[in-house]
Image (cartoon, coloured by chain):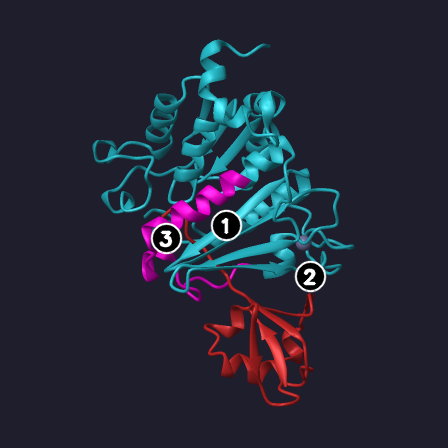
Amino acid sequence: MAFTNEQLERYSRHIILKEVGAKGQKKICNAKVLIIGAGGLGAPAALYLAAAGVGTIGIADADEVDLSNLQRQVIHTTKDIGKPKVLSAAETMNDINPDVKVNTYHTFVTSENIMDLIRDYDFILDGTDNFPAKFLINDACVMAKKPFCHAGIIRFRGQLMTWLPDRDLPCYRCVFKEPPPKDAVPTCKQAGVIGAMAGVIGCLQAMEAVKFIVGAGDLLAGSLLTFDALKMEFHKVTLPKRSKNCAVCGDHPTITELIDYEQAVCELKH
Amino acid sequence: MKITVGGETREVKDGITIAELIEEEKVETPEYVTVSVNEEFADRGEYSEKQLSEGDTVEFLYFMGGGRA
Ligand SMILES: [Zn+2]
């Protein structure tokens, strides 16, 4: 399929890049990316992926837009309060770029549905706010061999890492083993987060997705990039190799079925 | 001796253990922090015995939630 004149103009700043070109833009237009969580991280990622022309973008989230979201979840506006986040996000994405097909999943992601959700996508972004979901996404993507980018933010700090199949790379569980007990580690709701941090890290996730699609440069595979906004410093940690003892990607995995870790509903529903 | 912690050079006492470094660096919720030394995971059970050497690279890896909230 050839680009229309309108598309050539819309994507001209991509097409002119030697790392992207018309070929790369075509790959972007044919790519399918799933964003789990339409909140702080998912919002900027969804905006940039839609603007980039990613052909199909799935967005999964069970929540409705709340006033307290608007400090950082820039895909939603004041008039969207009360609306399912996935619908509000889809409207904004379609306004930015009508070329993009947005699939909305107004549901919690669980062990029951995650395999079906990720199946049709090339790359998954973890924009969730809780550890049960982060471990679920990791385990499902490792089992299904789906490339994904994990991220987390709190206060003035954020971090992200990417996992790719068949490369002997450490997964999220290699590093963090299992979810911390409830309330052992502060959440954004308890500890706060500076709004622009969601933008910084969510955009970096979108960057990883686009680089993966066009095959440009190096991904954060086997490394964790951390950002400290108070010091205004990025630090790239080279992670240890895949852990032979990892419960999901190790030599003798003990997790062979997906786990829904306990998380009180009030915690998820904020 | 000099070691690198989180990308920054630190002057620490010779033979400092991981447990002592955790205290010195005021690591928050250390029981939920993953430690790597020279790009290998350190075993939690070894923190109080394992001594670091000149030039070691130590990273503290923190749980971070956030995002959809
Ligand atoms: Zn692993």
Q: Name the spot of residue A71 as percent of width and height, x first.
A: 27, 46
How far from the left and from the top, in percent, is residue A117? 55, 32
| Residues at discs 2 and 1 in contact (Cβ within 8 Å) | no
Quarter-wise, where is residue B39 in the image? bottom right
Quickly name the residue at label 3.
A267
Q: In this view, does B42 lie above or below A24?
A: below
Q: Which amino acid, mark 1?
A: Ala
* Above or below, B15 relative to A126: below
Mark 1 residue crowding within 10 angstroms, few (<14) / some (14–19) / many (20+): many
Span colored in magenta = A178-207
For marks 2 and 1, the one nearer the N-term is: 1
Residue highlighted by disc 2: A240
Q: Does the magenta stretch include residue A79?
A: no
For chain A, give the colour.
cyan
* Up-down relation of residue A69 to residue A12 (above or below): below
Which chain is the one coloured red? B
Q: Mark 1 points at which residue?
A: A151
Mark-to-mark CA distance, 3 and 1: 19 Å
What is the secondary structure assignment of the residue under circle 1?
A: strand
Ligand 1 image-quadrant field: bottom right
